[in-house]
Image: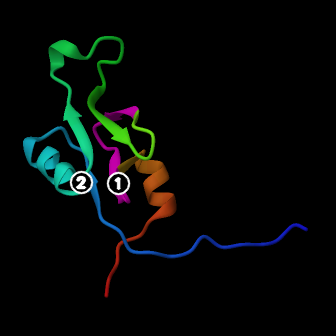
Amino acid sequence: MIQTVRRRQFDTRAVRWDGTPAAEAEIRALGADFTAIPEEDRGDDPDATGELREPPHGRRVLLREGDHVVAVAGGGVRYSDEEYRGEFEPVTA
């Protein structure tokens, strides 16, 4: 039977990656397995300035400046800016 469902609301923490050491420290403070990629090591995708291992299987994903890392159990998950704005809103209370 087809059901109409709503994704459960929950509060979490997120950091927008902007390529700075401060953002790198904040992403790591979320508990995410994150590495900034030096310019000389960017290879095929020069716009990818960071790499994140997403739980639960440790899949490696590239981050571009403007992407968001959202805290989840076991680390962090990458969202593009568009995906992030469509899924999350700031907590005001």
Disc 1 packing (10 Å; few <14; some 14–19; many ≥20): some
Q: Which mark is residue 86?
A: none
**Residue 14 placement: quadrant:** bottom left
Residue at x 38% of width, y 74% of height: 11
Instruction: For the C terminus, give its image quadrant.
Output: bottom left
Whichever of labels 2 and 1 marks the residue nearer the N terminus, that label is 2
Q: Which residue is mark 2?
A: 31
Q: CA distance from mark 2 to mark 1?
A: 7 Å
Mark 2 crowd level (few <14, some 14–19, many ≥20, 10 Å Cα): some
State the residue in front, 17 or 7. 7
Q: Is residue 9 left or right of residue 31?
A: right
The reply to whether the C-beta atoms of the residues labelled 2 and 1 are less than 8 Å apart is: yes
Side (left or right) of 87 relative to 31: right
The residue located at (51%, 59%) in the rendering is 86
Q: Mark 1 — residue?
A: 74
Q: Looking at the picture, does residue 87 appear above or below residue 27?
A: below
- Image quadrant holding the N terminus, namely bottom right
Magenta range is 60-75
Residue 5 in which image quadrant: bottom right
Residue 87 pos. (x, y %): 50, 62
Name the amino acid, label 2.
Gly
Q: Horizontal and vertical percent for residue 88? A: 44, 65
Q: Nearer the viewer, residue 9 or 75?
A: 75
Q: Is residue 88 above or below residue 63?
A: below
Q: Residue placed farthest to the left in the image?
A: 21
Task: Identify the image's colour scheme: rainbow, by chain, secondary structure or one colour.
Answer: rainbow
